[in-house]
Each structure stands twice: as structure tokens, then as C-alpha cells.
Image (cartoon, rainbow, N blue to C red):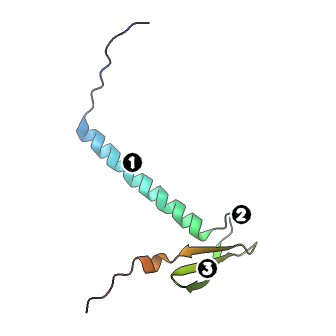
Amino acid sequence: MAKGNFYIDIHTGHLSKKLRAVSTRIRQIADDFDYIEQNYCEKDGQVLGHVETRFGHVLKECSQCGEKYIFPNSEEDHVVPEEE
């Protein structure tokens, strides 16, 4: 087997733009996965219906099998306190 040097010429301007594009898409995919997890039943894929919100959490129930799920209330996580 021949030995030698291997060089990679990277144009960092293009690379950084490409990496930013990839990171944007990965964030979008992660957001989509979070949405699916919080709105569809893990067992049968049916829509989860809102049952109640209490103590900073949301209780949801599967419309088909009755499986219940508890999630942090994301709306409360994003509330900005009012200034006095």
C-alpha cells in the first residue's frame, strides 16, 4: 500500500454557510419531532386531546386507546413577566 500525504482544500466561506443551513434544518426537524411527541399517541398514532392544565403541566389523552400523557406547559415556559 502506498503511503503519502492527503490534503483537503476547504473553502471556509462556503462551509460555514452550509453548516448554518444544516443546523437550521436540524432545528426544524427537532421542532417537528417535539410537535409529534406532544400531539400524537405513541402507541397508535392517534391525536391526543387536551384534558386539563394544572400545576404547570398539560394532561392529554389519546382519542382512541385512552392512553394519558403529561407534558410541561410550554405556553407557561414562554411567558414574559410584566414589569411593574
Q: CA distance from mark 2 to mark 3?
A: 17 Å
Using the image as rendered, state which of residue 2 and residue 17 is in the foreground: 2
Residue at 67% x, 63% y: name it. Answer: 42
Please name the residue that numbered disc 3 is placed on.
Answer: 59
Residue at the outermost top position: 1
Label 1 or label 3, whichever lies nearer to me, is 3
Element type at marker 3?
strand
Identify residue type, mark 3.
Answer: Leu
Please name the residue that numbered disc 1 is placed on.
Answer: 22
Label 2 close to label 3 by CB (< 8 Å): no
Please name the residue that numbered disc 2 is placed on.
Answer: 43
What numbered label is drawn on residue 48? Answer: none
| Label 3: how many Cα within 10 Å (few below 14, some 14–19, many 20+) | some
Q: Earlier in the sequence, mark 2 or mark 1?
A: 1
| Label 1: how many Cα within 10 Å (few below 14, some 14–19, many 20+) | few
**Image quarter for residue 59?**
bottom right
Residue at the outermost front position: 55
Coordinates of residue 27 in the picture (x, y in percent): 42, 57
Q: In the figure, 61 relative to 42: above or below?
A: below
Assign the N terminus to one quadrant of the image. top left
Label 2 or label 3, whichever lies nearer to me, is 3
Coordinates of residue 18 in the picture (x, y in percent): 33, 44
Label 2 or label 1, whichever lies nearer to me, is 2
Q: Earlier in the sequence, mark 1 or mark 3?
A: 1
Quick check: 80 left or right of 61? left
Q: Earlier in the sequence, mark 2 or mark 3?
A: 2
Element type at marker 1?
helix
Coordinates of residue 58 in the picture (x, y in percent): 57, 79
Identify residue type, mark 2.
Answer: Lys
| Label 2: how many Cα within 10 Å (few below 14, some 14–19, many 20+) | few
Q: CA distance from mark 2 to mark 1?
A: 31 Å
Residue at the outermost right position: 65
